Every structure is written in C-alpha cells, then in structure tokens.
Image: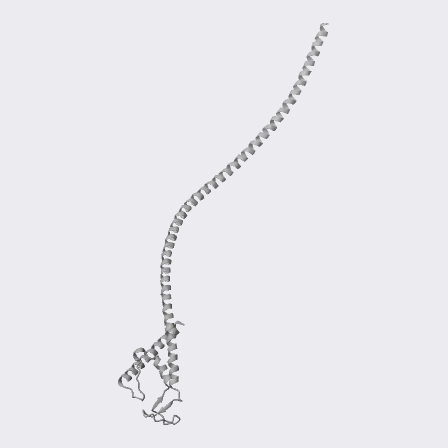
C-alpha cells in the first residue's frame, strides 16, 4: 500500500515534471517569439531612427538652403529698398525739374502767343494799309486810264491843223507839217477841263486864240511836275503790289 502510494506520488511528480517541461517549452517558444518580435521592432526602430536621422539631415540641409535664400532675398530686398529710396529721390528731383521746365515753357509760350497776337495785329493793320493802298492804286489806275483815253482823244489825226492864230489851214496829209496848232472840239476840251484841280480851273471868255501867258506856262509846268510825281508814285505802287503778290 505504501508502495502504491509512493508510485502514485512518483507518477504525479513525473506528470508535474512533464507538465512543467511542456510549460517551459511553451514559455521558451513564447520567449523566442517575443524575442523575434523585439528584434523586429528593434530593427524597425533602428530603420526608423536611421530614416529619421536622414530626414533630419535632409531637413536641416533644406532649412539651411532656405535660410541662405531668405538671407539673400533679405539683402536683395534691402538693396531694392535703398534703390527705391534713391529712385524716389531722383523721381522727386526729376519731377521738380520737369515742373520748372513746364513753367518755363509756359512762360515762353505765353510770350510767343503775345508776340504772335501783336504780329497778327500788325499784319491786320498792314493788310488794311495795303488794302487802302490797293484801293488808292486802283483809283489811280482808273484815273490814269481816263487820262490815257483823253490823251488818245486829243491826239486823233482827223483834227484840223492851222499854222498860226490867223487859223490858216494846213494840209494834214503833207510831210511838212512839223509845227502849228490843232483845233480841238470844245466837248473834248471840257472833258480835259474836268480833270484839272480846283485851283487850276479858270475860264477865259475869248473868241480868238491867245498865246500862253507866263502864269499859264507856270500852271502847265506845275501840272507836268504833278503828272511826273503821279507817274513815280504809280511806279512805286506797282513795285509794292508785285512784292505783295
């Protein structure tokens, strides 16, 4: 009986040992699995650490490059601001010079416009003067035309020619007629009388020819001088008219 109990205890102990061995084997397997998982996790951590280090290095390099660019941009911005200030100063100076130039040009323009207005007034006065001269010249031309027509009428060959105050006729067709007097119609003489100025119009009540007196000769000379003066004046007006055209 004791032996059976002892054997039972041995069997129980063996069973416990076997169970302990199985538990140990299971535990070892679990430890191996956990160890593998830990190694995997450690490897992943190392990989992540290396990746993080590489990423950090890359980020630091990128940050350094960005910081360099920021510094360069800051310098460029400062330089641009300085140039902007200089340009602003130059722009103000340029605007001032432009304003002064415009003011000077406006003063010059006003002076030129005033001068042009004065010249236009002078031109208008000159045109009026030339217009008056043209009217005078036209009137003189008409008067000269009348004088020429009167002279043409006076110099007609069909007038009677006499030798002397005795009214002895002269053959007008002869070649020896070099002196004498011409009988001019009264109507033609009255027409010429109308051309005389008021101070030279004198009427003599006579029926026979009288030789010219000294006063008559003086009046004739005065008329010739006046005619010469008018011809000179007409010539001057002709030259001015030609110059104007």
- Image position, residue 177 (x, y; %): 36, 93
| 107 sits to left or right of 214 | right
Q: In percent of the image, x 57 and y 32: which residue is there?
A: 48
Count of labels in the image:
0
Q: In percent of the image, x 39 and y 51: which residue is there?
A: 95
Q: Split into 4 quadrants, where in the image is the N terminus? A: top right
Q: Quadrant of residue 244?
A: bottom left
- Image position, residue 97 (x, y; %): 37, 52
**Is 156 located above or below residue 96 in the figure?**
below
Q: In percent of the image, x 71 and y 9: which residue is there?
A: 8
Q: In percent of the image, x 43 and y 45: which residue is there?
A: 80
| 63 sits to left or right of 126 | right
Of residues 200 and 28, the one drawn nearer to the viewer in this rendering: 200
Of residues 167 and 19, the one drawn nearer to the viewer in this rendering: 167
Of residues 204 and 20, the one drawn nearer to the viewer in this rendering: 204
Of residues 48 and 7, the one drawn nearer to the viewer in this rendering: 48
Query: Which residue occupies the extreme top position in the image?
Result: 1
- Image position, residue 17 (x, y; %): 67, 15
Q: In which quarter of the image is residue 156?
A: bottom left
| 77 sits to left or right of 192 | right
- Image position, residue 41 (x, y; %): 60, 28
């Amino acid at each position: 009986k004791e032996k059976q109990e002892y054997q039972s205890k041995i069997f129980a102990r063996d069973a416990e040992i076997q169970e302990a061995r199985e538990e140990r084997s299971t535990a070892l397997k679990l430890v191996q699995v956990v160890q593998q998982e830990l190694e995997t996790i450690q490897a992943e951590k190392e990989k992540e650490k290396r990746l993080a280090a590489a990423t950090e290095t890359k980020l630091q390099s990128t940050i350094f490059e960005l910081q360099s660019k920021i510094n360069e941009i800051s310098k460029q911005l400062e330089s641009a601001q300085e140039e902007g200030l200089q340009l602003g100063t130059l722009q103000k100076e340029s605007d001032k010079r432009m304003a002064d130039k415009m003011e000077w040009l406006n003063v010059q323009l006003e002076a030129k416009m005033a001068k042009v207005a004065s010249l236009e007034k002078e031109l208008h006065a000159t045109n009026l003067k030339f217009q008056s001269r043209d009217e005078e010249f036209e009137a003189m031309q008409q008067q000269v035309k009348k004088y020429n027509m009167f002279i043409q009428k006076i110099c007609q060959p069909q007038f009677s020619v006499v030798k002397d105050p005795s009214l002895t006729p002269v053959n007008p067709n002869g070649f020896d007629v070099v002196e004498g007097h011409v009988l001019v119609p009264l109507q033609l003489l009255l027409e010429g009388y109308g051309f005389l100025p008021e101070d030279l119009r004198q009427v003599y009540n006579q029926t026979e020819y009288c030789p010219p007196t000294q006063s008559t000769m003086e009046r004739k000379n005065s008329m010739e001088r006046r005619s010469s003066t008018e011809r000179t004046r007409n010539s001057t007006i002709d030259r001015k008219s030609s110059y104007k055209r």
